[in-house]
Image: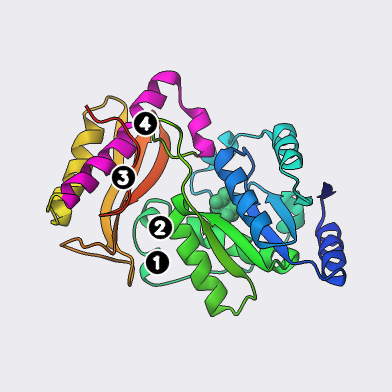
Amino acid sequence: MRQCPTIADQRAWTREQRQAARTIGFVPTMGALHEGHLTLVRQAKKSCATVVVSIFVNPTQFDRPEDFDKYPNTLAQDLALLEQEGVDAVFLPTKEELYPNGFATFVEVVGPLTDKLCAIARPGHFRGVSTVVAKLFNIVQPDVAVFGQKDLQQVLIVGRMVQDLDIPVRIEVGLTKREPDGLAMSSRNRRLSPAARKVALSLPRALELANRAFKSGEHTSLTLTNCVGEEILTNEGTDLDYADVIKLDGFKEVEFADEGCILAAAVFVDGVRLIDHVMLGGPSIPVIIE
Ligand code: PAF
């Protein structure tokens, strides 16, 4: 596995692949890799002849500096996992490499995709994501890039940016990977104490309860989101950031849900922010509900 610490190294690797007529699959990450990331890597390997993963904790997408400082760094373990998966190259730029002194250009998607959910709760977050992903696409020049479905708003924003800026890459979405008890995999789960880890299960449980209510005929968005709030807030140490029913077509809030809608929620469990969503009327989240 080739390690590319600079933009020049990464471009040289990309050039070699192009010369050998190999298609390039790309999985951008911030490290602290888990099985969810590895599933995206496997998907990229199926789609392309060669695969590159980037590991870069992007400072411009953190709205809270303490979140950036606390972001787990497990580089040695990450590299071992990627090696095992047969990844061909890993791009490991420094902050100075991607954001040198004088950096002053940002990419911002505007409109319905960035006026709700995480965009409200985390001002500037998606501007940082779009900017770094645009830069990574320019440097890596992949044919295919794979993003996780858990961060649905992120992948829709990236898709919009790629279309609007005519970036020649196909975006693929990898399904949300869950722990056996139903919690969506996330690098942030490592920050949960054993007690908070148990409480965190109230998020997928709440979403599944709402999904069941929807399947039994409850389509009023407020009732469905209240169902999520009640299930979460009965646990000590929790706070509800948002719970919203969104129609995917147009990415708008709706008063009454139908099958083209998701219920998305973000919660704080002992100060750790977790997000998840369920496709209303779609497959059940595998959680135990007593
Ligand atoms: O999803 C992530 O890990 C990050 O937002 C991404 C896409 C790597 C950009 O920093």
Give the mark, 1 or 4, whose residue is nearer the N terminus.
1
Q: Which residue is mark 4?
A: 200
Q: Which residue is mark 2?
A: 119
Question: Which numbered disc, 2 or 3, marks the residue closer to the eye?
Answer: 3
Q: Residue furthest front?
A: 46
> Residue 150: in sight, yes or no?
yes
Distance from disc 3 to disc 1, alpha carbons, whole Å, reads 25 Å
Q: Amino acid at mark 2?
A: Ala
Give the mark, 1 or 2, whose residue is nearer the N terminus.
1
Q: Which mark, residue 284?
A: 3
Magenta segment: 186-215
Give the mark, 3 or 1, whose residue is nearer the N terminus.
1
Q: Secondary structure at mark 2?
A: helix
Q: Are marks 1 and 2 in contact (CB under 8 Å)?
A: yes
The answer to whether 143 appears left or right of 183 in the picture is right
The answer to whether 217 appears left or right of 271 in the picture is left
Q: Where is 186 relative to 219, above or below?
A: above
Q: Which mark, residue 173?
A: none
Q: Residue at x 17, y 55 (%)?
A: 221
Question: Which numbered disc, 1 or 2, marks the residue closer to the eye?
Answer: 1
Whole-percent x, y for residue 48 in the image: 70, 62
Q: Residue at x 39, y 66 (%)?
A: 113
